Image (cartoon, rainbow, N blue to C red):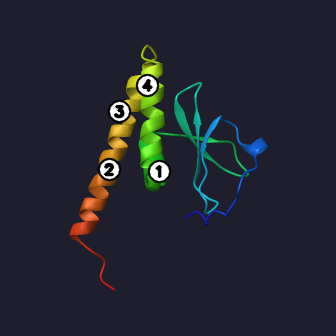
């Protein structure tokens, strides 16, 4: 298992894309690359890691609204790109996974 990520607040010159979702806790930062219609996990000491849009939602469920919005705007603006359909499918799968996860958690609350 990997070690916990060290908090990091990137400076503007450290952000590789024009659109970013920066986590106030200093971890789990996301970037959206307008050129290829893909989300990337941003790391302090590594290259950005491409993510399935569903994984972006699972990484940042609190930003599901922004992830859906960015994805759908990109898909509408690039209807002839093969990535458009893939991105919409990835978002749908990710949203479904989050809803199912929380629905199951609500049925089986953790007892302390």
Query: Image point 25% across, 60% down: which residue?
Result: 103
Q: How crowded is mark 2: few (under 14 residues within 10 Å), some or many (20 or more)?
A: some
Q: How crowded is mark 4: few (under 14 residues within 10 Å), some or many (20 or more)?
A: many
Query: Image point 35% across, 33% down: which residue?
Result: 89
State which mark lies toward you, 3 or 4: 4
Quadrant containing the N terminus in the rendered view:
bottom right
User: Badges 3 and 2: C-beta atoms under 8 Å apart?
Assistant: no
User: Badges 4 and 2: C-beta atoms under 8 Å apart?
Assistant: no
**Secondary-structure class at tag 1:** helix
> Circle 4 sits on which residue?
75
- Residue 97 has which mark? 2
37 vs 28: above or below:
above
Provide residue 17's location: percent of width, then percent of height.
Answer: 66, 35
First along the sequence among labels 3 and 4: 4
> Circle 1 sits on which residue?
63
65 vs 112: above or below:
above
State which mark lies toward you, 4 or 2: 4
Provide residue 32's location: percent of width, then percent of height.
Answer: 57, 37
In this rendering, position of residue 78 left or right of residue 94: right
> Circle 3 sits on which residue?
89
Q: How crowded is mark 1: few (under 14 residues within 10 Å), some or many (20 or more)?
A: some
Identify the image quadrant of residue 90: top left
């Amino acid at each position: 298992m990997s070690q916990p990520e060290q908090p990091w607040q990137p400076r503007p010159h450290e952000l590789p894309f024009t659109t970013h979702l920066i986590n106030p806790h200093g971890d789990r930062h996301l970037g959206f690359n307008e050129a290829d219609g893909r989300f990337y996990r941003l790391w302090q000491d590594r290259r950005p890691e491409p993510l399935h849009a569903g994984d972006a939602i699972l990484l940042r469920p609190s930003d599901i609204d922004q992830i859906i919005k960015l994805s759908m705007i990109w898909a509408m603006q690039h209807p002839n790109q093969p990535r458009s359909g893939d991105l919409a499918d990835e978002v749908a799968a990710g949203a479904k996974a989050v809803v199912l996860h929380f629905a199951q958690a609500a049925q089986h609350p953790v007892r302390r």
